[in-house]
Structures are given as structure tokens and as C-alpha cells.
Image (cartoon, rainbow, N blue to C red):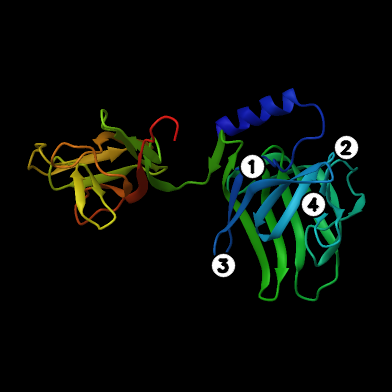
Amino acid sequence: MKNLAIWLAMTAGALAQTPEYLPLQVGNQWVYRTANAPQQVLSVVRQETVNGNTYAVLTGLLNEVWLRSTADGVLVNYDREARRERPYLNFAGREGATFATSAHPCNTSAEVETKNFKGSFALGEFSGVAAIRYGGLVCADAGLTADYYLPYIGLLRRTEITIAGPRTYDLTYARINGTVMISTAETTFSVSTDKSVYLRTNRDIPSVVARMTLRSDDDLQLEFGTGQEIEYLLTDSAGKTIFKWSDGRNFTQALTSLRIAKERNWAASIPLKGADGQALPAGIYQLDGFVTTMGGARYRGVVTIEIAETKPAGN
């Protein structure tokens, strides 16, 4: 969280105008947890242009909304049925001033209670948070009560009324502008490849550069029955194994262990060729990567790749 604090300070220093309380770049994503309900994901999925105005399209939490920020710092929502803009949130207004809102169909008004709220959230303790209070309830058992926005990061917490009682959404993960990623304590495992499509030629046999990544905020102690820690399996569309990373490799047969301190990566180069040494035919393949822990693979992932034929020049 120290790196996040440094980044926020640098960003705030560089931009003296009204802070960007909800970054709207395509690809931005926020994950929220709440009690007795599934996690919710808020995403900026694309942009749309109407009458010369470009809107970020957000999905999750509520129905799809089209938002843009005006030059004076007001967040507006394009109502596609009415074909006009409606005020969404006004971060530029003075504290305590009521404004109209379309953030929820059961609320008609809101106010920025303070822009200097300090509190403890799932991601840590923050100050300089904009606290939004909602009013104008038009529904008996639904509506927003409060939002908390951290500049340049987005919505930290939302509280609302539901038919089942009060509900709170807390931000646990955010990816902003493809560079700023923050999260609560967690353990993650992923399998990645350098490409999704590999070109097959008569001269060259392409190879997949694969990587498994295990990250954990807790120290992990992994136990293995041999010296082998990982396995990669490449299978074709019929489920036949084409490549097995461990084939031809020697491993100690003694029990071994491995301590994961924050992060561990395993990389491998996997040639896309068959047992005859020839390049694999065009088609869809599955790359299965897993950590060979005792008692079964606790960490496993699959990536789909494609081998495509190159086309002769002029076609």
C-alpha cells in the first residue's frame, strides 16, 4: 500500500484541477465484496460517441451506464431512452450542496458531505476521500445511502438499502490504466503465454513462451513427492496429449519442499511440434499448467492457443 500512497501523491501533485474520482479509461476494473452475496465486478468495457461526446460504458453493480466527465468536473450519464444527459455525480460542487443524481433509480438527490473523509477500508486507511450522501429516496426498500471515492482510484465503498436489509460493497481489487493494481491480501495463480495465435510455416516451428505465476501475501510452504515442481501439458482439440514438459527430464525422487515468499514464476519454452518433429497442424490447442504438489495439483490453469497457417503473399 506504500507504493499506492506514493503514486497518489505524485498524481495529485501533477494535476491541480478537480481530481479524477472515477477513472474512465477502457479496461479499468474494480472488484467488490459484500456479505451474503456474490462479489461484484465494475468494468469500463468500451467507449461510445453520441453527438460529439464520448462516453465510457460501465457494467456491473447496476445496469450498464454511459458516463463522461465534463470540463468542470461533473460526471454525467447519457440516458439512451430519453436521448439526453443526466447529472450523475458532482465532485466539483461545494461540500454540503445538494445536486440531482442518476446514480441509482431510487435516488433523486445527493451531496458531497466532505472531500477530506478519513477512514479504514478493505484496502487500508485513506484520507482525502470524497464522501457522498444520498437522499431523495423514491423506493420503500431500495436505494443508495453513501459512496466513498478515492481520487484517481475510484469507488472504495458503497452502502445501500435492499429488501434484505442494509448492504455494503468494499473494494478489494482495482486495475487502473493498466499500471496501477491494488488488492487486499490474497493468493492468486495464473498461466500465461506470449501470444494467443502462433503462425505455422514450412521452415520454422513456433514455440510458446509460457509462464506460471503464484502470488500470495501469506508465506506458502509447498511439499512435493519428487524434485519436480511443475508440469505443462499441451493437448489438441480431441484431448490427446501432444507435449509433456517433464518427458526426458530427470528429477530427484526424494521429498522436497519450496517456500513461496510473495511470488514465484516458472517459465518454459514449448515447441509446437509433434512426435515426428514436424510443426503441428493448424488448429486449437490447450496448454495446461500446474504445480505438482503432494496430494494433487493445488494450483492449476489452462490457456487456449491457436496455430494458424501463414498465407502466401498476395492472398
Disc 1 secondary structure class: loop
Query: Residue 43, percent across and down?
Result: 62, 50
Q: Nearer the viewer, mark 2 or mark 4?
A: 2
Label 4: state its secondary structure.
Answer: strand
Please state which amino acid type lies under the numbered disc 2: Asp
Check if mark 1's residue and mark 4's residue have beta carbons within 8 Å: no
> For the residues marked 2 and 1, what is the alpha-carbon distance in whole angstroms?
22 Å
Q: Could you say where residue 231 lies in the image, as x and y percent from the top left?
A: 22, 44
Image mark for residue 75: none
Is the residue marked by circle 3 packed among few (<14), some (14-19), or many (20+) residues within 10 Å?
A: few
Q: To which residue does mark 2 refer?
A: 72
Does label 2 or label 4 sit earlier along the sequence? 2
Mark nearest the camera among 2 and 1 is 1
Q: Is residue 275 visible?
A: yes
Q: In the rendered structure, which disc, 3 or 1, sits on the residue that comes first in sequence?
A: 1
Q: Which mark is residue 37?
A: 3
Query: Could you say which quadrant of the image residue 246 lies in?
Result: top left
Q: Which residue is labeled 1 in the image? A: 26
Q: Nearer the viewer, mark 2 or mark 3?
A: 2
